[in-house]
Image (cartoon, coloured by chain):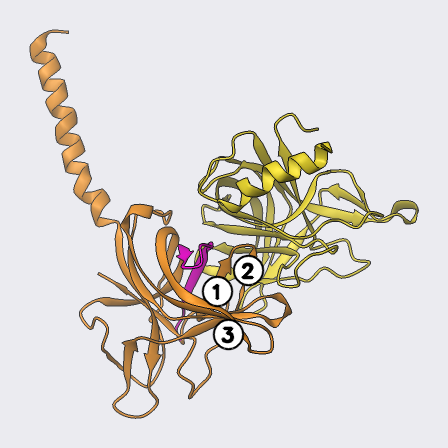
């Protein structure tokens, strides 16, 4: 091939790659997740800083606080380099005795599946987390590292009143070989076991 | 030194450091049959296991596979899936290992294990469904002798934004909802 043709072909390839790059970037979701706190008297608000729990077999359970961000490439599979966040954890026996406590750090994204339904339900609430971002339901699966050296998976799930009944609200998590796989359900009038996603 | 004891001493440290690569150690998982031909409980591959979502809609899997230890380790395998609502079915393939932790416990000595090398443990696997959706399959194996009550027996899975988090409990006399995890070091039969 002559040098001029080679140069033209090379420039064409670079141009095509450059043109395609913004489209790929635009499909990535920049997501914030929170275990949220809500109140039950006016003015109704949603803020960060809530708690959520999940149960393992035998009745032992784990409670988390936390929030974080991740960038999810199109297609849902994760990117470990684009996650932030963490919070606190406490584990309990079935009788409520504390067996461990500490902090955790999010170390990666496993999956993000947004759902096309508005989160939460009435009454309308003032969003004190990020009122400019799009609020979303969905399911996020995150890798986490506990302060006691164990690792695990944190699942954050958010639903709304128009979501399919198959969706749940709350968190589940593994810690080592134990899977706290049963989410504690949110209860009316109790400020616990609620989550929220914001998409930039 | 007893060969099995040596193998156990060699494998356990590798399993507790999930970031570490453990070359030569292969983990096999199965959704199993537990039957009692001629009165002896016997484990074979080829069973089915189910889990339900928040509204009790169900997903049922068959399947098996293998993976190498280490986060995001190489993985093979797959099987079939069936959902109750919406009614759908197809196949799935395992596309990667997310995480694996071995758990305490061993198999009762009177059970005939046609797979072998049974261990308790918890595996998180990336899967791709034949309808284009993706998810996470969790395979958890509880073994009765010295096992932890916190370790469940069965499977859970996500499929898109639906999480089938509630495993169907294995019931005595019913051939369903049981798993098997086998750990084999290179050179071990």
B110 sits left or right of A85 in the view: right
**Same chain assignment for discs 1 and 3:** yes
In this figure, which residue is indicated by the disc labeled 1?
Answer: A172
Relative to A2, is A8 above or below?
below
SS class, disc 3: loop
Q: Numbered disc 2: what chain?
A: A
Q: Position of residue B58 (x, y in %)?
A: 60, 61
Same chain for marks 3 and 2?
yes
**Residue B158 percent across, percent down from the top left:** 50, 56
The part of the chain drawn in magenta is: A142-160
* Label 1 CA crowd tier, 10 Å (few <14, some 14–19, many 20+): many
Chain with colour orange in the figure: A
Q: Secondary structure at mark 1?
A: strand
Can you tell which mark lies on residue A184?
A: 3
**Direction from residue B62 to residue A194 in the image, left or right:** left
Q: Is residue A28 visible?
A: yes
Q: Residue furthest bottom?
A: A41
Please report the residue visible at 66 percent of the width from the left and 35 percent of the height from the top: B6
Q: Which mark is residue A179?
A: 2
Residue at position x 55%, y 37% from top? B67
């Amino acid at each position: 091939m002559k040098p001029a043709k080679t140069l033209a072909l090379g420039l064409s390839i670079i141009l095509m790659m450059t043109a395609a790059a913004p489209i790929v970037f635009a499909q990535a979701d920049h997501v914030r997740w929170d275990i949220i706190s809500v109140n039950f008297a006016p003015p109704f608000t949603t803020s960060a800083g809530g708690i959520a729990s999940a149960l393992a077999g035998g009745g032992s359970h784990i409670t988390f606080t936390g929030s974080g961000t991740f960038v999810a490439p199109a297609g849902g599979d994760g990117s470990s380099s684009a996650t932030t966040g963490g919070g606190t954890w406490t584990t309990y026996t079935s009788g409520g005795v504390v067996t461990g406590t500490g902090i955790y750090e999010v170390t990666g994204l496993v999956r993000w599946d947004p759902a096309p339904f508005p989160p939460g339900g009435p009454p309308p609430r003032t969003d004190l987390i990020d009122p400019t971002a799009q609020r979303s339901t969905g399911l996020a699966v995150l890798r986490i590292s506990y302060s006691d050296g164990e690792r695990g998976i944190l699942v954050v799930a958010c639903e709304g009143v128009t979501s399919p009944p198959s969706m749940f609200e709350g968190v589940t998590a593994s810690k080592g070989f134990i899977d706290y796989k049963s989410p504690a359900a949110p209860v009316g009038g109790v400020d616990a076991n609620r989550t929220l996603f914001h998409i930039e | 030194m007893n060969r099995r004891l040596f193998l156990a001493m060699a494998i356990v440290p590798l399993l507790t450091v999930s970031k570490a690569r453990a070359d030569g150690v292969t983990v096999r998982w199965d959704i199993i049959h537990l039957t009692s031909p001629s009165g002896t409980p016997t484990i074979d591959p080829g069973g089915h296991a189910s889990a339900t979502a928040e509204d009790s809609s169900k997903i049922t899997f068959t399947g098996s596979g293998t993976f190498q230890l280490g986060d995001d380790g190489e993985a093979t395998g797959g099987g079939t899936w069936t959902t109750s609502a919406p009614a759908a079915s197809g196949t799935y393939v395992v596309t990667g290992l997310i995480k694996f932790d071995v758990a305490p416990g061993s198999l009762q000595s009177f059970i005939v294990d046609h797979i072998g090398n049974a261990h308790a443990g918890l595996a998180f696997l990336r899967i791709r469904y034949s309808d284009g959706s993706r998810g996470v399959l969790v395979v958890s194996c509880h073994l009765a002798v010295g096992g932890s009550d916190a370790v469940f027996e069965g499977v859970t899975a996500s499929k898109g934004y639906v999480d089938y988090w509630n495993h169907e409990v294995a019931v005595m006399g019913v051939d369903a909802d049981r798993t098997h995890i086998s750990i084999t070091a290179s050179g071990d039969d």
